[in-house]
Image (tube, coloured by chain):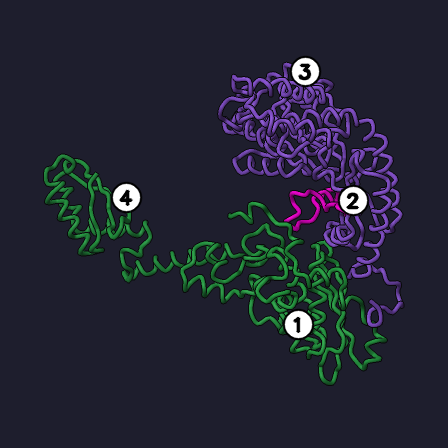
Chain colours: A green, B purple
Amino acid sequence: MGMDSLIGGTIWDEYSQKVTELMNNPQNMGEITEEQAEAMGAKLIVADFGAESCGDAVRLYWAVDPKSDIILESKFKSFGCGTAIASSDTMAELCKGKTVDEAVKITNIDVEKAMRDTPDVPAVPPQKMHCSVMAYDVIKKAAAQYKGVDVDSFEEEIIVCECARVSLSTLKEVIRINDLTTIEQIVDYTKAGAFCKSCIRPGGHEAKDIYLVDLLEEYEKEKMAKAADASLSGNIAFADMTIVQKIKAVDKVIDDNIRAMLIMDGGNIEILDIKENGGYIDIYIRYLGACSGCASSSTGTLFAIENILREKLDQNIRVLPI
Amino acid sequence: MKVYLDNNATTIVDPHVFAEMEPFFVQRYGNPNSLHLFASETHKPLKTAMEKIYAGINAPKEDSVVITSCATESNNWVFKSIFFEYILTGRKNHIIVSEVEHPSVIANAKFLEAHGCKVTYLPINSEGMIEAHTVRDFITPKTALVSIMWANNETGAIFPVQEIGNICAEAGVLFHTDAVQAVGKTPIDVQSFNVDYLTMSAHKFHGPKGVGALYIRKGKELTPLMHGGAQMGGLRSGTLNVAGIVGMGKAMEQAVDALDYEMHEIRELRDAFEDQLLEIEDTFVVTPREKRTPNTILISFRGIEGEAMLWDLNRAGIAASTGSACASEDLESNPVMEAIGAEADLAHTAIRFSLSRYTTKEELDYAIEIVREAVKRLRSISSSYAYTPKGHVSGLDSH
């Protein structure tokens, strides 16, 4: 948690000077009319993104030179909070003079960086990062309209965290390579989930198709499935097995090698628990029937059990009768 | 000019309240539960303050008005106690709250829900009102508690707590009301109807922050939330906040004295301001004004996102709110706007202005000017508001 989170934010105080100025006096606010575009010899593009009911909506106007594909003029209108206005304004500014193909490469991160006062200090607090995402999306829509293609054709990858622009493939890879098991780790490694937090789990600011918790769960299942497959084919080290697999493996070794002898003597053995203890794997057992009173149960028989388990499964096994 | 129109979030401490509190920091700092002279000199002021708080809600001496740290604690106490006494033991399995309660009630309802209690979230109607008869419809033999706020923090809607209290009494169900927004704005008399628990908070009526209270009717005592040194008769342990209690007592006394002023003069100021706001086109106010506390307006400006509006007002020194201040850090739409069934497009356009007895006509005259300017500017930026008449050329040659 930490002190900053305990006090909570006055989010407006975290805006850069540039953001504040653009909110108060946006430079590219307005429309481009059909006549104005025509006067420039340009094609007019008007693209909408977002919805008032979601709290954010933006409309982007482009006048594009059809010969060079260069965006001659770029304007916006926006229903949204101040940061939405400032990032829409910055986005419109960044589009100017670029070709449509170049403009599509502008991301929300470029927009946010352009609004910084100093290179290392974010222009907006984390929970406002999603406002700039809209700026990115509306550009794609405008470009798709201009080129007469589907908007998805610009997105080569599935983006899970739009604020930090982290793709599904990157996330899967980082989780797998680093064996990540918690949301905090994902945030540390990738910055996904660090901003508006919508992508972490359902119930955030925006509904998502894929959440980070899903990816963790998927990876966890993958690991389990792998362990199960490997154990079937006998290709897995005892230490890497799940607890259930370990119990089964121990039971099988005892079944194959020891249990029959114990039963012949009117006794038996049951496995109570398996715990990792420093470098050792401790297997807790209990003798049943005749074995429970037998002198050999704490000496000869015990050594025999321990030896066979060490030989078949893992050298670090210790057998502890209860 | 600085104008504070966010009095449902918190209020200025009345200077008389502050003056009464002051001696209890440096001069009379004794722990009232000690035996020596330092303790005894705090005792009389404490008693006087408690008498004022009792008097403010007309609570009889045999009932308990337990001082807590805030309304959130008072509300938590009711719900957690109900959980331990009724839900955990399996005696009851259901509670009823309104869908527009303060987060300190909603979050508690969700907590109980997560622990196996059934919760009915009572809907408000299109006027933002709770209809008392709906409470009766949802009560079952297994209902432990009904908790409905006296006045809503966002709209100011005054809910029919007397009627609801009596329905609960008939059904043998405990009734709690969060009266945080009602104290000082509408008369409160716990003897005039059935209410078992009633939450208050000093800082909402010109008292200090960090002190609240829970009224508990005799015979309806709750399992303590705060265990410890058995202060407050063992109901709420913790060293008594003498200065805070003295402040709350004085604030309560003044709130009662000023009630008439709030209900007439402030109401008139509010109504006049509201009339001016409604002259701006494409606006609407939630809940008819005669059904509201005298100080509150929740108004929607079509085409303008609430936070952008607050930004423009703030630039000119005016403090208002988009809803509950507790929620200002997250970016959700206004729950009341959703609950009254307003068009989805308006869910993010609500602004709350809340006055106090310190609000003046001059302040409101200034505020209306600023609101008009802000509406004009923000609608000209808005992508969804057709502010620019059709055919008019704007944009390239104008800023």
Q: Chain of mark 2?
A: B
Residue marked by disc 1: A150
Residue marked by disc 3: B60
At 56% from the left and 57% from the top, the residue drawn is A199
Label 1, secondary structure: give it: loop
The residue mark sitting in front, 2 or 4, is 2
Closest to the observer, A291 or A309: A309
Q: Is residue A111 visible?
A: yes
Q: Chain of mark 1?
A: A
Label 4, secondary structure: give it: strand
* Separation of marks 3 and 4 at Cα, in angstroms: 62 Å
Q: Amino acid at mark 1?
A: Asp
Q: Chain of mark 4?
A: A
Residue marked by disc 2: B3
| Neighbourhood count class around disc 2 (C-alpha, 10 Å): few under 14, some 14–19, many 20 upward | many
Same chain, marks 3 and 2?
Answer: yes
Indicate the position of residue B157 as horizontal and vertical percent values. Answer: 76, 35
